[in-house]
Every structure is written in structure tokens, then in C-alpha cells.
Image (tube, rainbow, N blue to C red):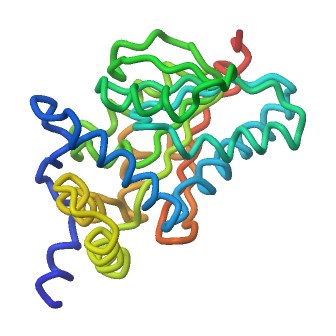
Amino acid sequence: MARLFRTLRHRAEQPERMDDFSQGGSELREALRHLRRLNRIFGAAPPALYGVRRLWSEAGRPKRLSILDVGSGSGDVNRLLLRWADANRIDLQIVLADVTEEACEEARRLFRGERRVRVMRSDLFALPDACADVVTGTQFVHHFGADRLPGAVRRMLQISRLGVVINDIHRHWIPWAAVWLATRLVSGNRYIRSDGPLSVAKGFRARDWDELGQALGMADNIFYAWRPWFRYVVVVRKSRAECGRRK
């Protein structure tokens, strides 16, 4: 246990199996399906809604809203956003963007028949500027090490018109142990068993978000909050002048 505490003091730098794009195929597709189950168990969707709702409210609660979910995987957390839009009579359009074809296939299958959701295969840095009101990333930015994280979030800001919502994991021994156990109970998939606990070790603590705000030069425009269960939601707002250029 003492060794685990020492390990979790700093973000792990080891790449996840999912970061190796030379692999994939049926095992990755299975991992994405099992990840949806784990997302339900660990409450992955509500923090994303919390952040989107915050930016939406600050923008004057518009009746039309577009969201781009980068590194979306199969995009399952967005089902809660669609229900929220229905309840509030918001014309919501969502684009799910992921770099792997396996994730795009799973997303198309999951949202088949849902006209408000479009799936595209794309890397974060290939997306056009100001192409969505809100850019979200659920369990996405922990894939970037400390040296690359500010650049990734800066690019997410450039893609957005209002701001960015980050939904990621609190680096702590409790979620590490819970995820280690859950992945072994619900899946025999190598991606899930390897990347589940590692994703917690690559997660964040409050000081990491403070350092990100400083690195971006946007300490006054970044808000973060701890959310159940052992998650952080981070909202990075664009300046009023930039929001005024919303298309």
C-alpha cells in the first residue's frame, strides 16, 4: 500500500494499450463495449453534463447548442446530454470525434438512428477552429503527459466557441483499487485490465489543474470541481471577446 501511495503522488507516464494505434480490431471494439459498462458503474456521464450546463448557463441558455466530443470512444456519456437537451427543449447537435476506426464504428452503432449525433474520424489537431460551441473530453486529456497537456487543451479551446469541458479521473488509491477490482470482475479484455487502473494513475489532483491554468495563462478562466465518484470536471472559458465572435 505504501508503494501505491508513492506511485500515485505523481501522474504515471506509461502509455496505455489504447495509445498504441498499431493494434486494435475486435479486441479494441470489445474493450469499448466493456468501457461503457464501467462508465455506468463509475458515473462517467454526470460530470460532463455539469460542465456543459455551466457553460450553457453562462452563455445565456441558448436554445441551440453544438458539442464536439474529442477522443469520444463510443460516445456513450453523451446520451445523458441528449436527455438533458430534450428536457430543456434545446436544439442540440453533437459530433463525436475519435482517431480510431473501431471507436467510430462503435459510436455509429450506439447512436444509429439518432439524427442529432454525427461521428467523424479525426485527430484533435486536425479539427478546424471554432467548429463547435463547446468542446468536451471525457477521460481524454489524461492520455497527454504534463509537457503535452497545455497544448492539447489550448487546441481544444481553439476548436470551441464558448469553452472546454474536461471530465477526468481523480488520482487516488480508492478509485485505483475500485477500478482494479471492477475491471477484473466485468472483463477479461486486455485493454480493460491494463488501461483501467493505469488511467487512474495517469489522472489528476487539484494542483495539476492549478498548474494547467498557469501554463495556459488562464488562471482566472479555469474552474474545476470534484464530482462523484472520484472525478474532476474542469471548465475552461473563453474570454468575453472571443465568445462574442461565436458563429
Does residue 142 appear to the left or right of 227 in the view shown? left
Towards the viewer: 241 or 42 = 42
Residue in the picture at 38% in, 63% down:
207
Q: Residue at x 15, y 47 (%)?
A: 17
Residue 36 at x, y percent in the picture? 45, 52
Q: Residue furthest bottom?
A: 1
Q: Is 229 rendered above or below residue 20?
A: below
Q: Is residue 143 above or below residue 91?
A: below
Q: How many marks?
A: 0
The picture places residue 196, in percent across and down from the top left corner, at 27, 61
149 up-or-down from 188: above or below: above
**Which is more toward the observer, 187 or 40?**
187
Asked where in the image residue 193 lies, by quadrant, the reply is bottom left
**Quarter that holds the C terminus:** top right
- Could you tell whether 15 is left or right of 8 in the image? left
Looking at the rendering, in which quadrant would you find the N terminus?
bottom left
Picture coordinates of residue 23 (x, y %)?
12, 34
Task: Give left or right: position of 243 versus 215.
Answer: right
Identify the residue shown where x is 36% and y is 32%. 103
User: Looking at the rendering, which quadrant does residue 204 occupy?
Assistant: bottom left
Q: In x, y percent, where is residue 32? A: 35, 45
